[in-house]
Image: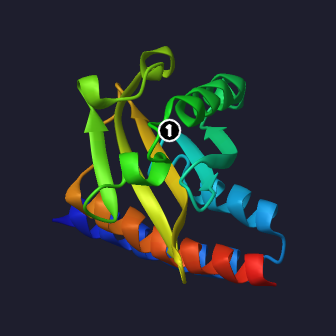
Amino acid sequence: ARQRAEVAQARVELMAQASESLNVELDLGEARTRFLELLVPVLADVALFFHVNEHGGVTEQLALHRDPDGTAAATAYAERVATTAPRGGLVASLVTGGPSRLLDGDSLPTGADELAIGSALVIGLPGRLGVRDVVVLNRTVDRDPFTDADVDTAVDLGRRAGLVLDNLRLY
């Protein structure tokens, strides 16, 4: 019971930190980076950010690894995911039927094994006109898979971040 309470408290603190951190940022690129920094290592070991155009094609990507020495490999992985997304677009292929999608085993993108990724959680970041940003949270094989509470937290953070990023694009 105590451990569950500590985990719940950590999630509340993460949400408060996200609201505070993202709402003071005026630079779109910096806001994207800060968002990834909030997620790694609390929710993920490797986080990928993708901005997509109106056709679902990736126009920008970012990657962050919990180990700074792993960032180059994470960046290469993000590029691979961006270039191998199906023709319908990254958003359509990754977030089908809801605000998130869990991936593991054979459903992980090619190259996940190079980063020892055991599970991934794909989150759409909705703005006023729909999802234009996608975040892929990755956990390595030495870490427990995502729980329902992790998914709920990530989806909530994604909604908040999506609106902040949308506002910054308008600004």
* Mark 1 Cα shell of 10 Å, populated few (<14), some (14-19), many (≥20): many
Q: Is residue 74 above or below residue 163?
A: above
Please identify the quarter of the rendering in which residue 86 is found: top left
Q: Is residue 10 above or below residue 66?
A: below
Left or right: 84 in relation to 69: left
Please give the name of the residue rendered at 72% of the width and 56% of the height, measured from the top-left corner: 33
Left or right: 33 in relation to 54: right
Q: Residue 106: percent from the left, percent from the top?
A: 26, 23
- The residue labelled by disc 1 is 45
Q: How many marks?
A: 1
Q: Residue 122: percent from the left, percent from the top?
A: 40, 50
Q: What is the quadrant of the N terminus in the image?
A: bottom left
Q: Residue 76: percent from the left, percent from the top?
A: 66, 25
* Amino acid tagged 1: Asp
Please give the name of the residue rendered at 53% of the width and 32% of the height, measured from the top-left corner: 81
Tell me if residue 145 can be seen: no
The answer to which of 144 and 113 lies nearer the viewer is 113
Q: Outermost residue, top direction?
A: 114
In terms of secondary structure, where does tag 1 sit?
Answer: loop
The answer to which of 119 and 95 lies nearer the viewer is 95
Please give the name of the residue rendered at 62% of the width and 46% of the height, measured from the top-left corner: 58
Please give the name of the residue rendered at 44% of the width and 39% of the height, measured from the top-left corner: 138
Q: What is the quadrant of the C terminus in the image?
A: bottom right
